Amino acid sequence: MSIFRQLSALLLFTGLASTVVFGQSYVTDMARQSARSDIRTGGTIEKSELEPNDPDVTLTVNVPSFDMTLWQSGKEINKYYVGIGLKDFPIFVGLRRIDTVIWNPAWIPPSSKWVDPSLHGKYIGPADPRNPLGKIKIPLGYGYLIHQAKSSRDIGSLVSHGCLRVMRNDLYDLNDKLLLAQGLNVKNEVARAKRNRKTYVIELPESVLLEVTYDTLVVEDGQLHIYPDVYGHRNDKIGALRTELQVNGVDVSNVADEILEKMIRKAVKKSQYVIGIEDLRAGRFMNGRVLPVVPGAGRTG
């Protein structure tokens, strides 16, 4: 049983599902490290093809790195890049459960300031150009959704009102893998839903745990990734970087704050700073590279 499914089972067994999965604990959720970090994976992410009829699948998202990973039995099945909520409408950080996948969803505009008041509470059908959800929506509770991105410009950007936006082909792939893992044979129904605009609801036999983290400092495969603090959640960035380096065997007792601050400042807008742990252990703190957070998106700052 994977660590994610163990966590889900523990929450349900101890009665914490309502207080943790459906009502967030800020301190716990903000302290949780990315599922891709070496501390959680043991230093290696094993990749695998999806095994049919094995429902031990989970999804994880790390907000600052704009990535969503599908896991099965602790192995990476696929990684997708996403768009996230605007600063005024941030995506939640914590745990949710996925129970349904809805094809060609309707949209009921909420009574929110970002929605035209004339649309509040109205039924906006799947074929209506005012419907922003696209071909698939995956409810996450409390009004949060995974749904189709408007365009590739959404990916790696703060664009939504609290939802995760995913490219259509990636959503198709995620749908197919979730259904295959749970042994649901609805290929014909899905094929029709792709062609038409009729709403089709798929109820999953088993809930899928979704974990959303906010980790700006991730050591993955021996590389430190410093991501932009997109929501401004991290106050003591230098202290957090010192702790992350010490946990990963880097002695920073004699390293000046100015050097760490210079590293952090390289991660701005849509750029990350990446440097090997061995370089850091050797004291080569500025030997890293500035790369796009989302590959292929280009550097913007």
Image: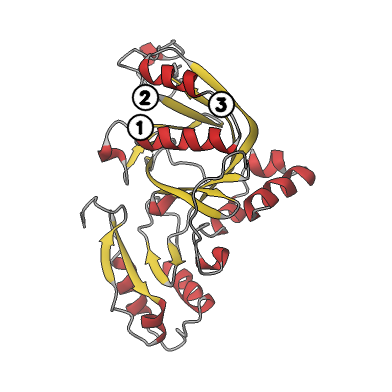
Which quadrant of the structure image shows residue 288? bottom left
Which residue is at a point 79% across and 45% down the rendered structure image?
13
Q: Which residue is mark 2?
A: 134
Q: Nearer the viewer, residue 177 or 131?
A: 177
Q: Which residue is mark 1?
A: 168
In the visual, does 127 lie left or right of 201?
A: left
Q: Are marks 2 and 1 in contact (CB under 8 Å)?
A: yes
Q: Earlier in the sequence, mark 3 or mark 2?
A: 2
Which residue is at a point 24% across and 52% down the rendered structure image?
296
Residue 236 location (% of width, % of height) = 45, 66
Q: Earlier in the sequence, mark 1 or mark 3?
A: 1
Count of marks overlaid on the render? 3
Label 3 CA crowd tier, 10 Å (few <14, some 14–19, many 20+): few
Query: Quick one: which residue is furthest to the right in this view?
Result: 14
Which quadrant of the structure image shows residue 293? bottom left
The Cα–Cα distance between marks 1 and 3, rounded to whole angstroms, is 21 Å
Q: Which residue is mark 3?
A: 185
The Cα–Cα distance between marks 3 and 2, rounded to whole angstroms, is 23 Å
Which residue is at a point 38% across and 65% down the rendered structure image?
225
